Amino acid sequence: MKITFYGTRGSISVSEPEFYQFGGNTSCVLVTFDNGRIAILDAGTGIRKLGRDMLAHGIEQYDNIFIALSHTHWDHIQGFPFFTPAYSPQRHFTITISGRESKITNLEGIFATQMQHEFFPVSLSEMGAHISFWQPEIADFTAPSGIKVYASKHSHPGNACGYRITEGTTTLVYCTDVEHGETIDPNVVKLAQNADLLIHDAQYTPEELKGKKGWGHSSWEQAIEVALQANVKKLALFHHDPDHDDGFLAKVEKECQRLFANVVLAREGMVITL
Ligand SMILES: [Zn+2]
Ligand SMILES: [Zn+2]
């Protein structure tokens, strides 16, 4: 399994030069399975470059590509209107989020609304690809290709969803936009148990977190605590705050590596092979 980070920033994209190293695009991760198929996690602004790369590299998965969303805040869906493969009538995408305990009743409506003419010149129905929306009630799902997915809800304003994705004996866990509260959420630890790679929200420093109660995010210290409790092999800190520039994040990364040896701060363009 290969993980490619196309968007690592949280909340809003940033384009100033002092953000180039860790990247300015919002949440989007490409998963390339050993069987050659791909899936996409979140459709933040990073999905624009992903779409360009898909076309440039001739990714010919026409039957269906899953785009699994953590939730539908802007920084996780706003890149979709700029995702060029979705304009090809040959392509088929399934945009999905767990329906269990979900507050979202009309996922398609959310995507259609952000492309209403007041906001964007082309409507969702004019894009061209076959786009399905799917909110399964089930937590466990096995794709026809044999990939296993387990989804679980976690605390975030409006709720968000984490994914545990297993191919053979390799497991990736994607858990962003998560607020733990006073103690670490045991459901998140369960989701991440023994993962080969955990991608976890680390928007704030421990000091910043104290003033951001109810904003829906974690500190890097909490992400490391989850990794330790869940016995994960590698941790990628994700959803960097738009006020944290490269110099700041490089210092955070050094600090984190003193507490957990196998941790990196996710960078746009970074590839991790499991
Ligand atoms: Zn977010
Ligand atoms: Zn959010």
Image (spheres, rainbow, N blue to C red):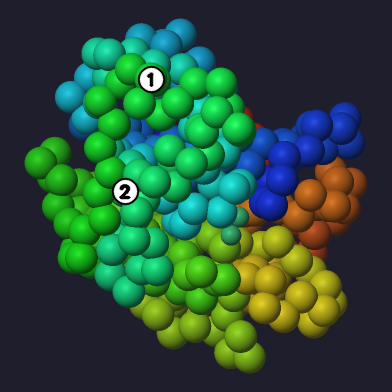
Query: Crowdedness of circle 2 by 10 Å Cα count: few (<14), some, many (20+)?
Result: many
Residue type highlighted by circle 1: Glu
Viewer-closest of 159 and 23: 159
Which quarter of the image is occupied by the N terminus? Answer: top left
Q: Is residue 50 above or below residue 59?
A: below
**Left or right of residue 206, residue 138 in this image:** left
* Disc 1 secondary structure class: helix
Residue 272 visible in the current orientation: no
- Examine the image and state in which quarter residue 46 appears: top right
Q: Position of residue 235 (x, y in %)?
A: 55, 59
Query: Crowdedness of circle 1 by 10 Å Cα count: few (<14), some, many (20+)?
Result: few
| Residue at the extreme front of the image, as rendered | 118
Q: Is residue 1 above or below residue 124?
A: below
Tell me which numbered mark, 1 or 2, is placed earlier along the sequence. 2
Q: Position of residue 28 (x, y in %)?
A: 52, 40
Q: Which label sits on residue 96?
A: 2
Residue 121 visible in the current orientation: yes
Q: Which label sits on residue 126?
A: 1
Give the alpha-carbon distance from disc 1 to disc 2, as whole Å: 20 Å
Residue type highlighted by circle 2: Thr
- Examine the image and state in which quarter residue 207 appears: bottom right
**Left or right of residue 14, residue 57 in this image:** left
